[in-house]
Image (cartoon, helix red, strand yellow):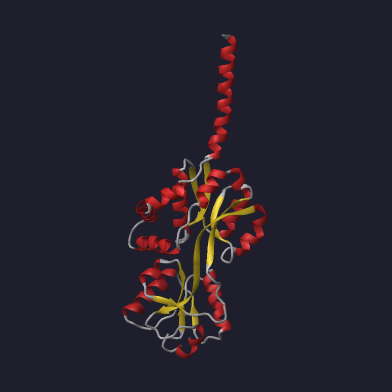
Amino acid sequence: MKTFWKSLCAAAMVGMAILPVQAQEKSVTMGTLSWEDLTPITGITKKVLEDKGYSVKVVEFAEWGIAYAALSKGDIQILASQTDYVAQDYWNKNKNRLEKISPVSHGLFQGVAVPKYVTIDSMDQLNDNADKLGGKIVGIEPGSGLMRDTTNAVKDYDLKLQLVEGSTAAMTAALKSAIDRQEWIAVTIWEPSWMMQKFDVKFLNDPKGVFPPPQSYYWIGQKGFSAENPGAREAIASVYVPLADITAINGEVSDGKTMDQAVASWIEAHADLIKRWENIKSE
């Protein structure tokens, strides 16, 4: 009888020792930036992980440098990011301590756009039509990557138009006002954005290649994450969110939904797809 109780106690102690390890393996801390392209990716991936039994904590950051520092130090485990251009400097600085887990979307693009009724198609046609465009390109917040690229474009194309600094809200208002009046306007804009869905605009061709080509989004993690968390890695790698869907989610936000509500609506409408994503071999 003593032998039985000793064995039972030993088994219980082993079980208690294993439980914290299992709990740790079934938790993921992900980082995100509260931007309209990254938030849907984060929300959808979080849902898939939770459906696979993971406890998921999301930590928001204000800018790439802080997010990459947190990932490198281990304060978070994974982060959705572009690595080819938008966050290239941060990726290059930290990549020896990081790994790419899987691609999750593709097509991020930014440049100068005009309404489709405007009869020019290329950056090198701007000067000949500067008067029609009010002698300016309506920009967004100073210091953004898009404004930096557009500043370079003004120099490289020797444009006579002034790049006007402002805010995304002010640019959007100016674009809407011009389209309502069928006036000519040139703005800095990006895809994915609800504005590309809401307004009938076109990017101007960039024959000098000042603006970067379309970029991919990846889930990245601390080096060793995939090996240490194979089940989480498989769940994450199953997720792919087309750019058009990200744009549609943000269109719902611009129409009054919260981001959480818009992501939840997308998840509900794509329940069968998410089930297929989740139909993978568990750990």
Marks counted in the figure total 0
Left/right of residue 123 with respect to residue 69 in the rendered view = left
Q: Quadrant of the N terminus?
A: top right
Residue 61 percent location from the top left of the image: 52, 55
- Identify the residue at horizontal 56%, vertical 13% (top origin): 5
Q: Position of residue 49 (x, y in %)?
A: 47, 46
Q: Is residue 143 visible?
A: no
The answer to whether any part of residue 3 appears in the image is yes
Image quadrant where residue 194 sits: bottom left
Q: Residue furthest top?
A: 1
Q: Nearer the viewer, residue 119 or 276?
A: 276
Please give the name of the residue rendered at 55% of the width and 84% of the height, measured from the top-left corner: 157
Counting from the top left corner in percent of width and height, residue 199 is at 37, 73
Task: Pick the residue in front: 185 or 135.
Answer: 185
* Image point (57%, 44%), residue name: 230
Quadrant containing the C terminus is top right
Q: Is residue 252 left or right of residue 95?
A: left
Please say if 184 is above or below 148. Answer: below
Residue lying at the far bottom in this picture: please name it: 128
* Residue 198 image point, x, y percent: 36, 70
